[in-house]
Amino acid sequence: MKREPARLIPLSEVDFCAFDVETTGLSFYSRVLEIGAVRFRHRKQPDFFNTLIKTGISIHPGAEAIHGISESMLAFAPAPEAAIPAFLDFSRNCLLIAHNARFDVSALSRELAILGLDVPGLATIDSLRLSRKFLQAENYRLATLVEHLGIPIERLHRALPDAYAVYEILERILAGNQWLAACDLEELISLCGGTLHIESPVRGRPDRTPDSVQAALLPALDGNSVVSLSYNGGSKGADLRPVRPLKIIRRHGVEYLDAYCLIDERRKLFRLDLITDIS
């Protein structure tokens, strides 16, 4: 759905797409390795989408422990160049919805940047915010809501079961609230606190960070590892910079490595697209 969804559309006429992603690691810099989605209208039969993605990036053990996706499972999976456009086609003209949506939106936005795909911002609402308004549960984690509502899912933390849970949550909220079900699209978006948008973080510019940098950063983002950066910027020229990586952040659509510099003995920010190598 485009950035400005049509107003005064009854919810019965809205195409929704509940989705979830699983990633190679536990940080913002991780790559998407699975997408699951459920496309539906209220009270209508849903359609399903699910794909693993072979990114070429190692899976962090902590992430694998959560979703259970191993390297061997990706042997015959499509590359991002095929998988991401397939999801975009499946969700075309939909209002997307995800649980704690900021993570999923950020992950897919980064994939668009890496692939150089400059698509209109895909509007996404957050089922977490909607659940807090219309459900009374011990907490609003997805697993808690699945148990609270009796949604028949055996295992969460895979993309399609999580997306199905989001679909069920929205359907049950709408079924249990006649006033909400009679709302229009604008009112629903307002109740969700507005929309997030899946879009390339740097419009029109493909990601220029080498795969070797991505692969080296993932296991080093623990605050204890020391790596040496080759950085095409700053005052030290081509000299290697020993740093302790802490986290990846994004400011104004640009991604940075937040790291402790052992030379200057302080925390510094390094633009990811200016890092040419890590050893």
Image (tube, grey):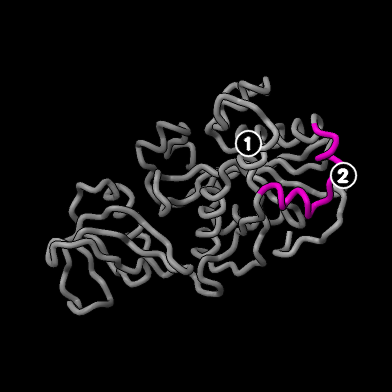
Classify mark 1: residues with Cα within 10 Å, few (<14), some (14-19) or many (20+): few
Give the residue at x 36% y 64%.
Answer: 256
Task: Give the Cα distance between marks 2 and 1.
Answer: 22 Å
Is residue 235 visible from the viewing direction of this image? yes
Q: What residue type is labelled 2?
A: Ser
Residue 186 belongs to magenta span: yes
Tell me residue 275's x, y (percent): 30, 68
Q: Give the range drawn in magenta.
A: 177-192
Does residue 227 lie above or below 156 as drawn? below
Tell me residue 125's x, y (percent): 66, 49
- Tag 1's secondary structure? helix
Give the residue at x 72% y 37%.
Answer: 170
Tell me residue 27's x, y (percent): 39, 48
In the image: residue 253, left or right of residue 96: left
Which quadrant holds residue 72? top left
Q: Which amino acid does label 1 sit on?
A: Arg
Image disc number at residue 12: 2
Residue 167 belongs to magenta span: no
Give the residue at x 86% y 56%.
Answer: 8
Tell me residue 249's x, y (percent): 39, 59
Give the residue at x 27% y 46%.
Answer: 222
Image disc number at residue 160: none
Classify mark 2: residues with Cα within 10 Å, few (<14), some (14-19) or many (20+): some
Which quadrant holds residue 158? top right
Quadrant into which the N terminus falls: bottom right
Does residue 213 lie above or below 188 as drawn? below
Q: Which of 160 and 148 is in front in this view?
A: 148
Image disc number at residue 132: 1
Is residue 90 visible from the viewing direction of this image? no
Does residue 39 lie above or below 138 as drawn? below
